């Protein structure tokens, strides 16, 4: 079996994050990440504090001890994680876990599997629910239509990465004689297209250190023609955080070149934002865009049944959370933990939870400069104020009328329509899909409405985001 290669510490932190979420129901805090990075690089706590701005005592006495205990519990096998042993502990654990991940794909007994090498860490999944139509559609596009680029787009927690991993399983198990490589790359906000191409070309044992970007791209295309690959760029929305238009153009040109050249490889993108908002190209990018919605009812019910939660109320929760699997997982775990699995008792309190992944997405939307215009904020705040229940919708004409009363400046109808179309493409607002000439109506899903009304970090009404607020957010994360 081919061992998944680990390229750097950040990749390990991404893999570790999932384990921490499963263990402690929260992600790693920024301070914990600083301690892990420091220990990995052999630094003492004084150096960590000096470089990060944290207090030495805080990192050494408050952060590190419970972190070592938590990591020891996650790794298991009676391993005692300490600062000096951290690097070896994590490498051994991640390598072992990546082998387990591939075994979960049920491919290790396939004699053809040895012909496909894996680079990078696929997200590990205990269970996978539904998505048969999506898998069938994309598999057909990739193999029958020779599609060279597919984008899976949807809100945080909707299951894009897990769907991509399932697609890899499907394609490799059926066509492992065909695909030489599967490359999984988690996209970071500071990942330049030059660094990405360098990483990809290095997998083919090509030294591209002193080569120009143009030469490296041509070299990569040659390899993609001779070595059919499945390349997954997971979390493309991270590139928007860089707020760099030049980078948008560079990525646009790169993806355009990959989709226009003839080769037998396929690039699968996952993103919370529409691809057109992340890259820029003056030509039409040839790709299949698949908007990932919530699970169908029968598939979503399996989430509750796996946790021994039953009853008609499960169907109500599926509608409330719009079939978002991570949101349903989160609420099911809380029903078991706080209400002893009694879903009727949970409904007595009439509350709505906001899951970690969806909240992180909403934090980014409202926090980051340039993602939401002032008009888009006003639209969402207005809908949150006016939508009194989870299925209420407001006619477009009424939205125009009431926004004109709220706003001090003149309201441009064309700008309003454009703003609402963008919000709808991002799945931040909902609309009716009626046939005929009925006026379109808009609403919010309950979780988004609650986030806006509660405004947990003050991002919704505060357009001037500060670094101090970011520090608080990272600590809360």
Image: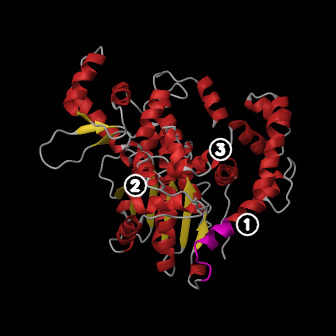
Q: Report the magenta residues as a range.
A: 98-109
Q: Which residue is mark 3?
A: 26
Tell me the crowding category of disc 1: few under 14, some 14 to 19, or many 20 or more residues within 10 angstroms, Cα based.
few
Residue 396 in percent (x, y) is at: 22, 33
Residue 367 in percent (x, y) is at: 50, 30
Image quadrant assignment for residue 278: top left
Query: Is 266 above or below relative to 285?
Result: below
Element assignment for label 2: loop
- Taking depth in this image into account, of 101 and 279 the one nearest to the observer is 101
Query: Is 226 above or below relative to 248?
Result: below
Q: Residue furthest bottom?
A: 111
Element assignment for label 1: helix
Name which of mark 1 and mark 3 comes first in the sequence: 3
Q: Which residue is mark 2?
A: 292
Tell me the crowding category of disc 2: few under 14, some 14 to 19, or many 20 or more residues within 10 angstroms, Cα based.
many
Question: Closer to the camera: disc 1 or disc 3?
Answer: 3
Q: Is residue 58 left or right of residue 372?
A: right
Residue at 30% x, 50% y is: 283
Residue 74 in percent (x, y) is at: 75, 55
- Taking depth in this image into account, of 281 and 6 the one nearest to the observer is 6
Name which of mark 1 and mark 2 comes first in the sequence: 1
Which quadrant is home to the N terminus?
bottom right
Q: Is residue 313 left or right of residue 396?
A: right
Q: Is residue 334 left or right of residue 40?
A: left
Query: Label 1 to label 3, Cα distance in Å?
Result: 23 Å
Q: Residue furthest left?
A: 437
Q: Which residue is mark 1?
A: 96
Q: Residue furthest top?
A: 408
């Amino acid at each position: 079996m081919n061992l998944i290669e680990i390229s750097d510490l950040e990749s390990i932190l991404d893999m570790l994050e999932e384990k921490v979420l499963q263990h402690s129901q929260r992600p790693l805090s920024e301070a914990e990440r600083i301690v892990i990075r420091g220990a990995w690089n052999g630094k003492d706590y004084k150096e960590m504090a000096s470089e990060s701005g944290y207090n030495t005592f805080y990192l050494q006495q408050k952060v590190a001890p419970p972190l070592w205990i938590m990591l020891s519990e996650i790794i298991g096998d009676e391993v005692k994680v300490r600062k000096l042993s951290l690097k070896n502990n994590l490498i051994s654990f991640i390598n072992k876990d990546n082998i387990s991940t591939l075994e979960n794909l049920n491919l290790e007994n396939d004699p053809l599997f040895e012909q496909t090498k894996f680079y990078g860490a696929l997200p590990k999944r205990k269970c996978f629910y539904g998505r048969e139509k999506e898998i069938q559609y994309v598999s057909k596009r990739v193999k029958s239509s020779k599609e060279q680029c597919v984008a899976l787009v949807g809100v945080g927690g909707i299951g894009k990465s897990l769907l991509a991993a399932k697609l890899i399983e499907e394609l490799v198990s059926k066509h492992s004689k065909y695909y030489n490589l599967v490359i999984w790359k988690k996209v970071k906000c500071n990942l330049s297209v030059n660094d990405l191409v360098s990483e990809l070309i290095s997998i083919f044992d090509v030294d591209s250190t002193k080569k120009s970007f143009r030469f490296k791209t041509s070299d990569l295309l040659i390899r993609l023609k001779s070595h059919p690959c499945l390349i997954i760029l997971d979390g493309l929305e991270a590139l928007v955080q860089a707020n760099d238009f030049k980078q948008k153009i560079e990525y646009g040109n790169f993806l355009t070149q990959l989709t226009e050249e003839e080769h037998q490889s396929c690039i699968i993108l996952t993103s919370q934002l529409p691809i057109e908002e992340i890259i820029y190209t003056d030509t039409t990018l040839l790709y299949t865009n698949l908007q990932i919605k919530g699970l169908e009812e029968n598939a979503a019910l399996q989430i509750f049944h796996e946790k021994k939660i039953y009853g008609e109320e499960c169907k109500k929760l599926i509608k409330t959370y719009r079939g978002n699997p991570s949101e349903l997982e989160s609420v099911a775990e809380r029903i078991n933990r706080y209400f002893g699995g009694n879903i009727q008792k949970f409904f007595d309190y009439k509350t709505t939870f906001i899951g970690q992944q969806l909240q992180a997405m909403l934090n980014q939307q409202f926090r980051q400069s340039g993602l939401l215009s002032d008009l888009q904020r006003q639209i969402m705040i207005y809908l949150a104020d006016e939508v009194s229940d989870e299925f209420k919708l407001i006619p477009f004409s009424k939205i125009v009328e009431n926004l004109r009363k709220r706003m001090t400046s003149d309201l441009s109808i064309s700008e309003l329509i454009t703003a609402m179309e963008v919000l709808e493409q991002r799945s931040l607002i909902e609309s009716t899909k009626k046939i005929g000439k009925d006026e379109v109506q808009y609403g919010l899903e309950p979780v988004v409405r609650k986030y806006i009304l509660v405004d947990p970090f003050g991002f919704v009404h505060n357009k001037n985001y500060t670094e101090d607020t970011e520090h608080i957010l990272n600590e809360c994360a």
